[in-house]
Amino acid sequence: MQELFIVQKMENKVLITGMNIISSLGLNLKENWENMVQGKSGVSRITLFDPSGLETQIAAQVPENFDEYAAGKIKKRQSRQMTRVTRMCFVCAKDTVEQEHIDFEQFDKSRVAVILGVVNTGNSSVEGTEVSRDSILKGMNNAMAAWVSLEYGLTGPSYTVATACSSSAYAIALGYDLIKSGKADMVIAGGADSIINPEEIAGFNLLYALSTQNDKPEKASKPFSADRDGFVIGEGAGVMILESEQSAKARNATIYGELAGYALTSEAYNIMAPRKNGEGMAETMEKALKDSNIDKHEVDYISAHGTGTTLNDLYETMAIKTVFGDKAGNIPVSSQKSMIGHTVGAAGVIEGVITVMTIKNNLLTPTINRDNSDPDLDLDFVPNVSRQAGVKVALSNSFAFGGHNATLVFRRYY
């Protein structure tokens, strides 16, 4: 009987029962989805500080009314102990729980986990340079997960994971494992980030990683285009509620889709550059499909990492061709970073949420600003305009500095 119980646990599907986004295109999922479908850009001149002395003076900032909105969601004392980025994460999580009417009093709280991808808490010069009694709390990497657990009295595992641009994709994968192994009924997964500050922008400029097309901010983020010149920094937060099929059905939860599997790999090659020809990226996608027991011919869409840097876009294109062969040209591929910039630690979850929405709505978000084709990048990048398409299975890629790769596989739930 014990063996049968374990088998049943392992076969338990991992479902998505809540999602939310805060980004430059809005303070909730509805706003973000509608603006992405319309192909809007959230990139503009930086207003968080005076960027005049920097090569890059543009970014995709969260709307200015966020602070006012957050004030109604967070107690004043708590707010003082949080950075702006931590507030983004907390509000995003709280709104998700509220919109899905999740009552944690009906759960065994020791079986509800919080796992967040956090590169840093945004405790930069933008927050101010004065040392206060809250400075340590603001800088704690684990603060975001702790605040969410505290809000609901959740006593299951609560921690953060840092793998640069793939951090929140890793968080989702680790949440999947907790549920699949039977150790949790629900996981609040996601992440938040902002590197819109003078120090980090100057640092990335020295690496020649950022776009410097300041004259037309809305046109600067152009993944998979011939004239791409680097990524545009974005900021924001995303949350994905993962839940066991038994738990979701028992409480009659709204089910947005299924997380069918994933792969996490390390390229062990270079601290900044991906392995040549996208070999590591291809390996990650191959392993994710195997883990999900999905044939490559079943894949209907790929949400690309698609940063707008020279090597990433070339190698990701090559990797998709390696994995899918003759079928590669028939699979729509798009990058939400063209609209909301690169949200770094939050990118994996934000793009994962949009991928699930793509499946749910059978609607592909575009890669905007693709006005100049690169002959070496010849896949279907859904240029500039959204498109109706039947989507049952989709991949979401996150490929990070340091070679921390992640591919999440989402599937329509029946």
Image (cartoon, grey):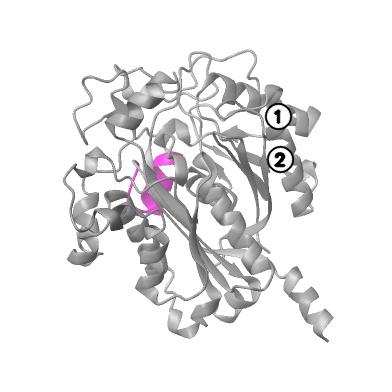
Estimate how packed mark 1 is, as few (under 14), some (14 to 19) or many (20 or more) residues with alpha carbons within 10 Å.
many
In the drawing, what numbered circle is on residue 285? Answer: 2
Q: Residue at x 79, y 29 (%)?
A: 325
The residues bearing labels 1 and 2 have C-alpha atoms spaced at a distance of: 8 Å
Residue 314 picture location, percent across and down = 62, 21
Q: Which mark is residue 284?
A: none
Q: Which residue is at 70% across, 40% downward? A: 284
Name the kind of residue labelled 2 in the image.
Met
Q: Quadrant of residue 216?
A: top left
Q: Which residue is mark 1?
A: 319
Tag 1 secondary structure: helix
Q: Does label 1 or label 2 sit earlier along the sequence? A: 2
| Residue 25 vs residue 234, the one in the foreground | 234
Q: Amino acid at mark 1?
A: Ala
* Secondary structure mostly taken by the magenta-highlighted segment of the chain: helix
Secondary structure of the residue carrying numbered label 2: helix
Q: Is residue 146 left or right of residue 68?
A: right
Q: From what the image shows, is residue 282 above or below residue 356?
A: above
Is 169 positioned to the left or the right of 220 in the image?
right
Q: Which residues are magenta?
A: 25-36
Location of residue 379 in the rendering, given as x and y in whole percent from the top left corner = 65, 25
Q: Is residue 115 or residue 414 the one in the foreground?
A: 115
Is residue 31 rendered magenta in the image? Answer: yes
- In the image, residue 1 sits, relative to residue 221, either above or below, namely below
Would you say 96 lies left or right of 138 here? Answer: right
Q: Residue at x 21, y 52 (%)?
A: 67
Which quadrant does the C terminus fall into? bottom right
